[in-house]
Image (cartoon, helix red, strand yellow):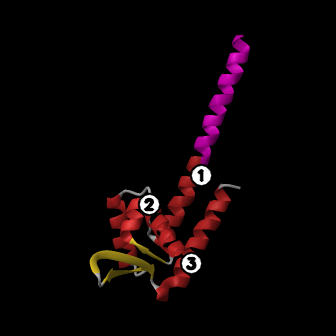
């Protein structure tokens, strides 16, 4: 009985080690990528959300995404300051903010997203 128990325990330990090895590889890849673009993982996620939507109201991001509101605001500011996105207020309701990819930087944003995707593929092959 003890031999079988020990094998199961060793398998569980090996699974845990494999998981953390993948996590550490992922962290390393993220760190390299994010440092290159001076963006956080939240910035990339928000950039992807806006890119996919083409145009999205900020309040819809608050409602539908798992990113905290304070982090969304921080990322919006950073992406806006980096000139990667634009912010527009709706004339009918000044409280409504619409986010879009800056058309002059759209190819750069596309490159960032494609580069990010290729980095992820390397990790999860």
Q: Give yes or no for contact between labels 2 and 1 (Cβ–Cβ under 8 Å).
A: no
Left of 50 or right of it: where is 110? right
Residue range of the region highlighted in magenta in the rendering:
1-22
> Nearer the viewer's eye, disc 2 or disc 1?
2
The image position of residue 45, as x and y in percent, is 48, 64
Secondary structure of residue under mark 1: helix
Quarter where residue 113 is shown: bottom right
- Residue 10 is inside the magenta segment: yes
Q: Residues within 10 Å of mark 1 (few under 14, many from 20)?
A: some
Q: Which residue is mark 2?
A: 64
Q: Which residue is mark 3?
A: 110
Secondary structure of residue under mark 2: helix
Left of 52 or right of it: where is 12? right
The image position of residue 16, as x and y in percent, is 60, 35
The number of callouts visible is: 3
The image position of residue 118, as x and y in percent, is 64, 67
**First along the sequence among labels 3 and 1:** 1
Question: Quarter of the image containing the N terminus?
Answer: top right
> Nearer the viewer's eye, disc 3 or disc 1?
3
- Residue 123 is inside the magenta segment: no
Seen as rendered, the residue at the extreme top is 1
Q: Which residue is mark 1?
A: 25
């Amino acid at each position: 009985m003890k031999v079988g128990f020990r094998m199961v325990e060793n398998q569980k330990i090996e699974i845990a080690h494999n998981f953390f090895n993948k996590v550490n590889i992922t962290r390393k890849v993220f760190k390299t990528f994010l440092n290159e673009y001076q963006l956080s993982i939240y910035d990339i996620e928000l950039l992807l959300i806006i890119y996919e939507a083409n145009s999205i109201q900020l309040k819809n991001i608050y409602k539908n995404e798992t990113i905290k509101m304070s982090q969304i605001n921080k990322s919006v500011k950073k992406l806006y300051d980096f000139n990667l996105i634009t912010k527009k207020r709706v004339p009918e309701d000044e409280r409504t903010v619409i986010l879009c990819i800056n058309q002059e930087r759209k190819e750069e944003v596309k490159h960032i997203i494609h580069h990010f995707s290729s980095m992820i593929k390397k990790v999860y092959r």
